Image: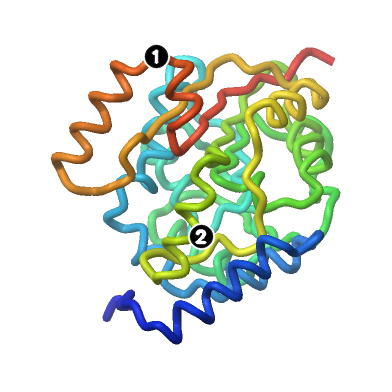
Amino acid sequence: MVKHQHGFTLRGSLWRAVQEWHYLTKPRWSLEDVGQFWSSVRDYDDINEDAYTYHRRFTNSFELAKDLIGRNNLTLDIQSRTGNGTMFWAERGRIRKSNLVDFSEHMLAIAATKLSEAGVEFEAHLVKSFPLPFPDETFDLVLSYETIEHIWERGTFVRELARVLRARQWMIITCPNILWEPAHWLAAIVNLHHSEGPHRFLRRGSLLSLFKSSGLEVVRENSTIILPFSSDISILTDRFLERRLPVSIRRTVALRRSFVLRKAEL
């Protein structure tokens, strides 16, 4: 398969700058808007195949939570995109069955094909509005990778995730640091990476308030990726900085926030 080539042209960059401005200034958006955008991203796995920052969302969250989360969980993978989060956890024996939820029919179809070929048990759900189509306290594990920033009704979103999670069970949420918003815009404008589409990056304090109001306890948290490049020397330097920098500095400057959350007893 021929991979999509990302290159710079002035005309293309001007068009993408207009698109990014539209996303930035859009007053509100729906789950259908999010789905339409992600259905337009036709090279998601190609772009991310060798991207250190992309794969780190999975490896870091697993290391953060692996001694807390048992095996064979009934799992919700919210905005699963091409199913890589479910694949990662299933390969490590942590998923019995995954319920994939996405707002994009295109992404959901890719994920379904991938998981079917891998022999992972799953159900696929195309969702266009809340509430989620599951009873209360259904899941042992909820995975939410880089999704909350794409949801306008983020309070409803977090409450819905908490509603369908069983008491005392686990949720993984990762999202970008708001400080890195300009870098994401620039990467999209010059065609180094796909756009993020409709989104708003959130401050840590806003996230913590959402978790608390939804009955979710932050059990563990970290901030990762100081250098977002994929060369060997950059990765080694990044991991060194993560080990050496104080937590307060990493929370300020690192690209990604990762949270391990537990639902309180009812």
The residue furthest left is 233
On screen, residue 119 above or below 176: below
Q: Which residue is mark 1?
A: 246
The disc, 1 or 2, on the residue closer to the chain's N-terminal end is 2
On screen, residue 217 above or below 192: above
SS label for mark 2: helix
Amino acid tagged 1:
Pro
SS label for mark 1: loop
On screen, residue 92 above or below 105: above
Residue at figure coordinates x 59%, y 67% from the top left: 20
Residue at figure coordinates x 52%, y 21% from the top left: 221
Q: Residues within 10 Å of mark 1 (few under 14, many from 20)?
A: few
The quarter of the displayed image where residue 205 is located:
top right
Residue at figure coordinates x 45%, y 38% from the top left: 255
Residue at figure coordinates x 68%, y 33% from the top left: 139
Q: Nearer the viewer, residue 104 or 17?
A: 17
Picture coordinates of residue 171, whole percent (x, y) = 62, 29
The residue furthest bottom is 11
Q: Nearer the viewer, residue 136 or 145?
A: 145
Q: Which residue is mark 2?
A: 185
Amino acid tagged 2:
Trp
Image quarter of the C terminus = top right
Q: Nearer the viewer, residue 224 or 83?
A: 224
Tell me the number on the disc at residue 110: none
Picture coordinates of residue 147, whole percent (x, y) = 61, 48
On screen, residue 143 above or below 243: below
